[in-house]
Image (cartoon, coloured by chain):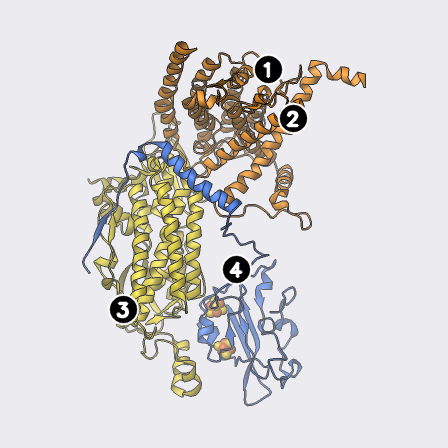
Chain colours: A orange, B yellow, C blue
């Protein structure tokens, strides 16, 4: 027993456990369930019932078994490599997006620390800069897939994806400048704790969405474009370039692209929660001073999950509501509208921060 | 050289090569491609994302409708016409039957004509719902597609009530219709039309006023009046260019001249205008249906000419003449007098005309159909060159190509 | 009626110049549908076929059936009307002598290739004896082999219902058969009779 505790207190072991916990119990399941939820929720919007046929005996779980069926199907499907494809690049391309998506979760705290133990894999100093670095990695997934599959449609998709993702990274960074200035740090735990302050006594929590309303919109838009979700899904352009950069993939590698997309959706949701909705902090909970520690932690995890799920739902809802932009319109929206707006937001925040804080 | 002829000549000469061999990319869009509903192939030449040339290739759904008809009896052609424009089969049935009636020189009873107007307009609505829905799905608004399909389903159930099938209607005969409208039809009709109106209003709020949608369709695929006329455009495509040409008014047939409706026209002839014209036509069709339902006279649904329709069973069983008529009609078929006719009618997509030649025997000598969307597909290069590859989607969606009608 | 023209209105208001209002308007509508279907009246239009079936109209043209007379015998007199009028040429009839001389003819074979059939209903209209009908309400026929779509006389025939029909004067064994049993029943396996 002592030995176990001792092993558990080694930081490396703790990190590995946390990585396993966050990837296996948070990121991947959320992404997987979202693949089903997208279909179920879109069915609700469109007055359908959605998938409900996969069954074991008579049990269908109202569609839940489709998760297992899809997994099995893609495992047993042939993994085709098109003629003339660049084999090695073609084979590794699907996993860039997935790795980048999962890595986002590394710096997200999902509950407050208990003593020395943090519910966060690592709280590095650069914090959000790590996110920018990691998301630019996922560009490679799209570009490599597009160029290596020896298909013109995929090539068009790949070029669209690279242009779009690289551009939107710019606005993503700029939109967050305000947050850095208001909370005075790029470290995630500082930003989260900064959002636990209150305005006007205990009236309004200083959440990012209140201190940076414009930044919130800009960042959300940029993140959706960065993850290539509708209405910015021109790189996939299912009606004109069929499926874009992952057109030629099949089986498990195709699933990796799909899973990466949904992990990215979940990633967007946790980022929005952490940066703009107070992270794990339950508003006004500090007023209840005698709250037991375990309850506080549970409430924090609960709040974090609810806001996260809300943002997942919002992205899915948006996808099934809006038509999609043409590729050049995506770019001009970015460079002509979002760029000036985020610059203005940065300047305004700088002035306000200098004047009042 | 007018623009139209220029574009026409660009159809036959391959588009110019770029500076080096690699700067022009040739991609085959279709025959099996998500945006090509119906089967058609566009060989597209791209400079980056810009379309510099396009060659449409049709014929993938050719079934030999015209030859097949020549080897059939007149009445046996009616089921084939269902499969021409298969999103508005009743309009083809009506067009063909009216052409044969013109050959005979007879007219269907008034009740039959009013029923035809109602059913025809229901078909026109389903046609436009499919077209607008599919076009909006392809620019990413999948939800509206399904809502429109839901609305279409309500109407197809009505069609089923009347004709006994949803798509393969085979409903009109020469001198009338196979079946009369059933009891309680008008109540169901009114209820369904209200539902369709609700769905239209929802989509109006969402698509017509949505900037993303407007961006995708506005000033895309613009076509001038002159070009449209020289390409032989008809129907909503021509009206979107600002020409108020509608066969129902220009050359009134059936009882359309007793019914009050407006012809919607656009101004620029871009995809947005085509969308708006179709949406407005759905509303006009609903009003036509309501008027026709109010004016519906009582009476027979079949002419009482001999040898035009099967005699009553009472006649067949009890009267030797009836029995002989029945057998003659089956064995020899309808025998319209010698002659040739062309009758244009307003289909869902534009003017559908039937050119028929009869030599007085029971077999058609020539059955030729003028498909509306043939001309539109011909104009696809003229509409798309100079746009981005993603614009093929709204342009082709607004063209509403129906393979069955195009390739026959 | 004079020609009335209506210029369609291109909406170009202030609201249409921005992305956000339409996005919110759209969200309101889709969220309304979402919650209505999740908690409320559930106006889901999907039919869970095959557990639920859509009621088809009385006039629905489904699979054919051959009707019987009051005495339980087939009404069909093998007059070839339906075979003649069929545009798909999918009916094949062979006539035989009926043992009852007042009836004369009787279909020894009556095959319909339901795969060729275009479900136009012309055969039903053409039949002088109301012997063939399409009112079975069978919407979908799905079998695993092409041959099973060849419906023979015995498969097309109505179910014999002793409550509705007098006992037939002639049993099947009294009737003339086709020369070889196989040619009459090419492929009767696997299809539930009517
Ligand atoms: S429904 Fe039409 S195609 Fe089918 S058997 Fe009867 S006549 Fe022939
Ligand atoms: S089914 Fe009717 S039309 Fe056909 S052969 Fe028998 S009696 Fe004649």
Q: Residue at x 40, y 47 (%)?
A: B133
Residue at label 2? Answer: A295
Q: Is residue A76 left or right of residue B376?
A: right
How far apart are labels 1 and 2 at the CA level?
24 Å
How far apart are labels 4 and 1 at the CA level?
59 Å
The mark found on residue B91 in the picture is: none
User: What element does badge 2 sit on?
Assistant: helix
Residue B187 figure quarter: bottom left
Q: Position of residue B165 (x, y in %)?
A: 45, 63
Q: Nearer the viewer, mark 3 or mark 2?
A: 2
User: Which chain's residue wears label 4?
Assistant: C
Residue at label 1? Answer: A123
Residues packed near mark 1 inside 10 Å, few (<14), some (14 to 19) or many (20 plus)? some
Can residue A283 be seen in the rendering of this structure? yes
How far apart are labels 3 and 2 at the CA level?
85 Å
Give the vertical position of C1 relative to A100 (above or below). Answer: below
Q: Is A206 or C131 nearer to us in this picture? A: A206
User: What element does badge 1 sit on?
Assistant: loop
User: Which chain's residue wears label 2?
Assistant: A
User: What element does badge 4 sit on?
Assistant: loop
Q: Nearer the viewer, mark 1 or mark 2?
A: 2
Residue at label 3? Answer: B102
Q: Position of residue C153 (x, y in %)?
A: 58, 73
How far apart are labels 1 and 3 at the CA level?
85 Å
Q: Nearer the viewer, mark 4 or mark 2?
A: 2
Give the vertical position of A240 relative to C55 (above or below). Answer: above
Q: Are marks 1 and 2 on the same chain?
A: yes
Asked whether disc 1 touches disc 2, contact meaning CB atoms under 8 Å apart, the reply is no
User: Which chain's residue wears label 3?
Assistant: B
Q: Is residue A174 left or right of residue B383?
A: right
């Amino acid at each position: 027993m002592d030995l176990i505790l001792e092993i558990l207190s080694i930081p490396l072991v703790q990190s590995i456990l946390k990585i396993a916990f966050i990837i296996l119990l948070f990121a991947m399941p959320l992404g997987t369930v979202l693949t089903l939820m997208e279909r179920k929720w879109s069915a609700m919007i469109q007055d359908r019932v959605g998938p409900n046929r996969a069954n074991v005996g008579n049990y269908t779980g109202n569609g839940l078994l489709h998760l297992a069926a899809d997994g099995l199907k893609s495992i047993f499907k042939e993994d085709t490599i098109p003629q003339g494809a660049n084999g090695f690049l073609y084979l590794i391309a699907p996993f860039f997006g997935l790795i980048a998506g999962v890595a986002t979760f590394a710096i997200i705290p999902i509950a407050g620390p208990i003593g020395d133990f943090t519910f966060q894999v690592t709280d590095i100093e650069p914090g959000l800069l790590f996110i920018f670095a990691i998301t630019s990695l996922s560009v490679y997934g799209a570009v490599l897939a597009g160029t290596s599959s020896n298909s013109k449609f995929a090539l068009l998709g790949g070029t669209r994806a690279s242009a779009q993702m690289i551009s939107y990274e710019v606005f993503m960074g700029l939109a967050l400048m305000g947050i850095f200035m208001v909370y005075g740090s790029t470290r995630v735990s500082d930003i989260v704790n900064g959002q636990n302050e209150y305005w006007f006594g205990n009236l309004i929590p200083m959440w990012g969405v209140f201190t940076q309303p414009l930044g919130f919109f800009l960042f959300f838009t940029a993140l959706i474009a960065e993850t290539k979700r509708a209405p910015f899904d021109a790189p996939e352009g299912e009606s004109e370039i069929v499926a874009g950069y992952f057109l030629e993939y099949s089986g498990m590698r195709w699933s990796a692209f799909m899973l990466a997309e949904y992990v990215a959706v979940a990633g967007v949701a946790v980022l929005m929660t952490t940066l703009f909705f107070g992270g794990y902090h339950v508003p006004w909970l500090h007023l209840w001073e005698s709250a037991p520690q375990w309850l506080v932690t549970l409430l924090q995890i609960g709040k974090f999950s609810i806001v996260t799920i809300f943002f997942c739902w919002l992205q899915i809802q948006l996808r099934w509501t809006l038509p999609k932009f043409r590729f050049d319109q995506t770019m001009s929206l970015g460079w002509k509208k979002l760029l000036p707006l985020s610059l203005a937001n940065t300047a305004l925040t700088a002035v306000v921060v200098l004047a009042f804080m | 050289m007018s623009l139209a002829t220029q574009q026409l000549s660009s159809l036959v000469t391959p588009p110019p090569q770029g500076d080096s061999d690699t700067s022009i990319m040739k991609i085959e869009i279709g025959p099996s491609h998500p945006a090509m509903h119906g089967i058609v192939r566009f060989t597209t030449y791209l400079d980056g994302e810009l379309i510099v040339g396009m060659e449409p290739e049709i014929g993938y759904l050719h079934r030999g409708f015209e030859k097949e008809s020549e080897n059939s009896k007149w009445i046996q052609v009616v089921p084939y016409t269902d499969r021409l424009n298969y999103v508005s089969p009743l309009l083809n049935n009506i067009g063909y039957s009216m052409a044969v009636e013109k050959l005979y020189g007879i007219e269907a009873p008034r009740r039959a004509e009013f029923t035809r107007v109602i059913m025809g307009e229901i078909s026109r609505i389903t046609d436009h719902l499919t077209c607008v829905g599919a076009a909006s799905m392809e620019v990413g608004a999948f939800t509206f597609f399904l809502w429109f399909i839901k609305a279409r389903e309500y109407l197809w159930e009505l069609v089923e009530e009347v004709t006994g099938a949803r798509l393969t209607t085979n409903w009109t005969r020469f001198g009338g219709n196979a079946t009369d409208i059933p009891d309680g039809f008008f109540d169901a009709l009114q209820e369904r039309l209200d539902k369709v109106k609700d769905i239209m209003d929802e989509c109006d709020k969402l698509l017509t006023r949505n900037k993303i949608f407007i961006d995708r369709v506005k000033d895309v695929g613009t076509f001038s009046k002159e070009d449209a006329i020289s390409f032989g455009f008809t129907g909503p495509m021509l009206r979107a260019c600002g020409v108020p040409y509608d066969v129902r008014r220009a050359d009134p047939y059936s009882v359309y001249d007793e019914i009050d409706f407006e012809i919607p026209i656009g101004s620029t002839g871009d995809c947005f205008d085509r969308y708006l014209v179709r949406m407005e036509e759905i509303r006009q069709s609903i009003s036509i249906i309501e008027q026709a339902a109010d004016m519906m006279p009582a009476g027979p649904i079949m002419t009482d000419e001999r040898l035009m329709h099967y005699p009553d069973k009472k006649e067949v069983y009890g009267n030797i003449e009836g029995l002989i008529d029945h057998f003659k009609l089956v064995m020899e078929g309808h025998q319209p007098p010698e002659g040739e006719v062309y009758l244009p009618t307003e289909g869902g997509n534009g003017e559908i005309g039937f050119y028929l030649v009869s030599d007085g025997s029971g077999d058609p000598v020539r059955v030729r159909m003028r498909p509306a969307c043939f001309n539109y597909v011909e104009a696809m290069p003229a509409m798309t060159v100079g746009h981005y590859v993603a614009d093929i989607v709204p342009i082709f969606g607004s063209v509403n190509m129906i393979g069955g009608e195009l390739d026959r | 009626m004079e020609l009335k023209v209506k210029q369609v209105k291109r909406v170009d208001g202030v609201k249409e110049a921005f992305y956000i209002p339409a996005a919110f308007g759209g969200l309101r509508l889709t969220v309304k549908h979402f919650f209505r279907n999740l908690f409320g009246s559930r106006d889901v239009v999907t039919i869970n076929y095959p557990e639920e079936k859509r009621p088809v109209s009385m006039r629905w043209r489904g699979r054919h059936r051959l009707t019987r007379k009051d005495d339980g015998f087939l009404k069909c007199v093998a007059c070839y009307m339906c075979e003649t009028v069929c545009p798909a040429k999918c009916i094949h009839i062979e006539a035989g002598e009926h043992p009852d001389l007042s009836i004369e003819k009787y279909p020894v074979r009556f095959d319909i290739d339901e795969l060729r059939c275009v479900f136009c209903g012309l055969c039903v209209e053409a039949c002088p004896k109301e012997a063939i009908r399409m009112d079975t309400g069978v919407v979908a026929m799905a079998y695993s082999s092409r041959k099973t779509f060849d419906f023979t006389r015995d498969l097309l025939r109505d179910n014999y219902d002793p409550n509705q029909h007098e006992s037939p004067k002639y049993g099947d064994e009294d009737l003339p058969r086709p020369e070889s049993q196989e040619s009459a029943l090419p492929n009767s396996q696997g299809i539930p009779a009517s």
